[in-house]
Image (cartoon, grey):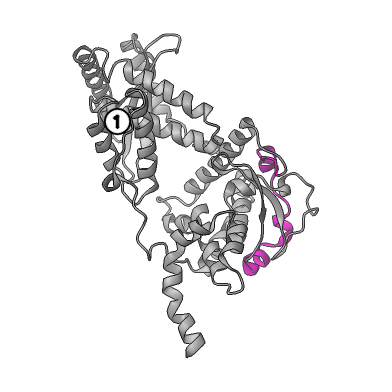
Amino acid sequence: MTAATGLRRNSARLKGLAKYLRTKHSDRFGLSLRRKTRPSGEELIYLTFNSRPDGSGDQKWLKLNASYQDGDVVISTAVDTALAEFDNNLKRNAGGPVGSSLGIYQREALGRIESAGNSEKHAARRVKWVQSCVRWLAEHNSKANSRDALLEWIKSWPAEARSRRDAISAACLLFDIATDGKRLNPGRENGYQEPAAGQGKPVDPAEIERIILGLWDRSKTSELAHACAWITTWVAVTGARGAMVMASELLWKKPGQVEVAVGSYVRCRDSKRGRNRPANLCPSWRGLLESVGVERLQQPPQRLRNAASPWDDKPTQDQQRKTEQELGAVHGWLWRELSDEKGLKADRELIGLRTLRHNAARRLLEVKQLDLLQIAGLLSTSEEMLRRTYADHHRFRSHEIIREVFG
């Protein structure tokens, strides 16, 4: 990853090896080696190339039987083996899954996603999962109209994870295209399962405050570090999504023009999944607000202003793209700074933006004067979502209420 953008890049070693392999496999246009890291930490390598010299054909992704830790000779041999198997598959399945049909279905799927009016972030996520499904089908010599193959791919993702929902969405879209409108209907047994109650317990506020103040200590090292500390703090004190903070009036007005205090409203916009509605940021954590300082939170770094989405109008695709790229850069910096290698993985997990949002929701649920409708408004979500996500919170606190009323 680069220090300037926070975005990932391939290593110089793989670039050099790919340059050599292009001379050896000149018929594989745009040949490149891509390094991918799984959540388990395993470093995989994929070989990519295009079917046409002008780049207009299908891009092929072949998973190599080698890892990043292997030597150049092992990786080069794995490339030769993968290409030989690819050519054999083409002959055996002419016009089939490893040939052009998957590419045709993928292009149509991407076209539908583009015209569906999704937000930039949601569209990018759907594209990623369609491409992932197509790669899996190609690697397993399967077809997009094979219900059994698509169900096998769906079941390869944890039932209680968001990835299961994304996998189902991608599989249903490809099956619909490949079968001229038939429904995949994965069934309840293969569908997404709501996480069991009792998961995602609240995090100690003192721990969160300690880590965030540590981010502010690092904020002097670069503007990207400053951006990470600023956004993380705003999500922690309000429970808002990162994209809502990036679409707030704080990033469009001069420092000091917007009041920042517990209970004050900072106008912003919620554009999640293509919706477009006004919303508000409302600080509710006095301790962290005072520890960081109001003046700091009124002065966002310039790079965030450059990537901001409007708070008083619908964002354009270009504005959404810039915002998502900046949030990705912030996320990348956090992963590097609080990395596994430095022994700071536990700290990083405590201040993930989604974790901070959940913690803020639980903080608001502790306030007896607020009902679910008011909390839903503060978090720009729905009452039903609060019931589903935090049902365990209400169950766990029932005995406290009984003790207070009748004890």
Kindly identify the residue that appears in the image at 79 percent across and 54 percent down: 256
Disc 1 packing (10 Å; few <14; some 14–19; many ≥20): some
Residue 294 covered by magenta stretch: yes
Number of numbered discs overlaid on the protein picture: 1
Residue sitting farthest toward the bottom: 407
Q: Quadrant of residue 45?
A: top left
- Left or right of 143: which side holds 218? right
Q: Quadrant of residue 90?
A: top left
The residue at the point 58 percent across, 49 percent down is 242
Name above or below for residue 148 compared with residue 90. Answer: below
Q: Quadrant of residue 130?
A: top left
Inspect this view and state whether residue 156 appears.
Answer: no
Q: Is residue 118 magenta?
A: no
Whether 127 is drawn above or below 381: the answer is above
Q: Where residue 363 appears, x then y in whole percent?
A: 55, 67
- Disc 1 is placed on an element classified as helix
Q: Percent x, y for residue 349?
A: 45, 56
315, above or below 209, in the image = above
Pick the residue in front: 186 or 91.
Answer: 186
Picture residue at 32% right of the left edge, 28% below the top: 135
Q: Position of residue 257 (x, y in %)?
A: 81, 53
Residue 102 seen from this side: yes
Q: Nearer the viewer, residue 399 or 342?
A: 399
Q: Which segment did they paint magenta?
A: 285-311
x, y percent for residue 327: 56, 43
Residue for badge 1 = 136
**Left or right of residue 285: residue 332:** left
Q: Amino acid at mark 1?
A: Trp
Decide which of 369, 5 is in the foreground and name it: 369
